[in-house]
Image: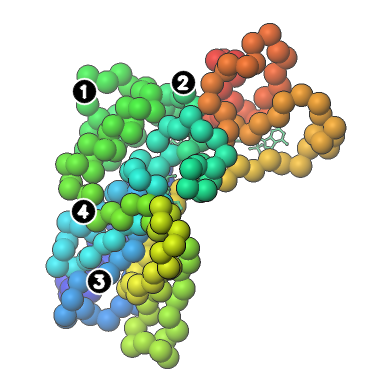
Amino acid sequence: MGKLEKQREHVHTLKAGSSTLLILSLDKVDPPDMTALKVAVIGAGAAGLCAARYLGAKPDVFQPVVFEQTGRIGGTWVYVEETGQDKNGLPIHSSMYETLKTNLPKEIMAFTDFPFRDTLPSFIGHADVLKYLEDYADHFKLLRHIKFWTVVESVTPIKKEESDREKWIVKVKNVLDKSRPVESDVFDAVIVCNGHYSVPYTPPIPGLEEFKGDFIHSHHYRRPDGYKDKIVAMIGAGNSGRISPSI
Ligand SMILES: Cc1cc2nc3c(=O)[nH]c(=O)nc-3n(C[C@H](O)[C@H](O)[C@H](O)COP(=O)(O)OP(=O)(O)OC[C@H]3O[C@@H](n4cnc5c(N)ncnc54)[C@H](O)[C@@H]3O)c2cc1C
Ligand SMILES: NC(=O)c1ccc[n+]([C@@H]2O[C@H](COP(=O)([O-])OP(=O)(O)OC[C@H]3O[C@@H](n4cnc5c(N)ncnc54)[C@H](OP(=O)(O)O)[C@@H]3O)[C@@H](O)[C@H]2O)c1
């Protein structure tokens, strides 16, 4: 098997639990006889960490840089009290509520090469999942690949006529120091791991605008305080409907 075929195999076998890894490019690269391929990974949640774990394991082939807009790994598993925007003006990413437990047993939620601790029950709280992801990052020494407080603002393909092979311009901004200019770098490939449960969608419901009570999307729900003695309607019987027993 040639070196390029080996690279394709590595890239196409990336897996991250129930998460989606969108591979934007890699098949189109020339055989890399000189340097490792620069791969930008957007986000340090479960998917971004998994990508970094496998890319980082082949330093002669891949050179991953993970951009994370917050100061922590874990993505949606980082429970925060706040709703709306964080103190840096970014929308709060996580939809976790205080009492959330996993809807899958830990035995099938784990990465195949890194089990959850034996002492945990099968269905665990969000803090245990976050600790698991932190242990995973620690075990595979992933923090060295991550640029925290760095939001990816755009990803633009470089047209073929301007380059001997297809590449991507990634523009990033430091979220702590807004006076710093946007920085850009060129990557051979980009893996988008920015999550897909952080932008709340409310379906059009006729009459909703006339409703006089409180109305929130589950993305902003944290705990049942405030709902005592109230009649509460839940719309939607997906997993977020599991909020209802605690209310
Ligand atoms: C409430 C809830 C409960 C869930 N429960 C379960 C469960 O029990 N079991 C299960 O298997 N799955 C569950 N999931 C699914 C969950 O989405 C996955 O488990 C997994 O955590 C998704 O990981 P991810 O890396 O794809 O995304 P995320 O965890 O969302 O991580 C994305 C990361 O990208 C960063 N980011 C986003 N945009 C940018 C940008 N432009 N620049 C830089 N960084 C950026 C974010 O800050 C974040 O750190 C649940 C999801 C939700 C919302
Ligand atoms: N670990 C946990 O306990 C937990 C808790 C919360 C969320 N999650 C995860 O988070 C992700 C999102 O889950 P989610 O439940 O927020 O979203 P979801 O899975 O998209 O479910 C939304 C639900 O709302 C219904 N719905 C949409 N519009 C409606 C309307 N106008 N009237 C009535 N019902 C309507 C949908 O029905 P249709 O399908 O018929 O459109 C669907 O059942 C999932 O991956 C889930 O597993 C996990």
**Residue type pointed to by label 1:** Asp
Please name which of the two marks, 4 or 1, marks the residue nearer to the observer. Answer: 4
Q: Position of residue 180 (x, y in %)?
A: 41, 64
Q: Secondary structure at mark 2?
A: loop
Binning the other alpha carbons within 10 Å of mark 1 as few (below 14), some (14 to 19) or many (20 upward) gives: few
* Residue position for label 1: 118
Q: Quarter-wise, where is residue 168 in the image?
A: bottom left
Q: CA distance from mark 3 to mark 1?
A: 38 Å
Please name which of the two marks, 3 or 1, marks the residue nearer to the observer. Answer: 3
**Residue type pointed to by label 2:** Thr
Which part of the image, by quadrant, shows the N terminus?
bottom left
* Residue position for label 3: 37
* Residue position for label 2: 99
Of the residues under marks 4 and 3, which one precedes in the sequence?
Answer: 3
Residue at 71% x, 22% y: name it.
Answer: 233
Q: Secondary structure at mark 1?
A: loop
Q: Relative to 171, is 15 on the left or the right?
A: left
Q: Position of residue 186 (x, y in %)?
A: 34, 74
Identity of the residue furthest to the bottom in this view: 161
* Residue position for label 4: 144
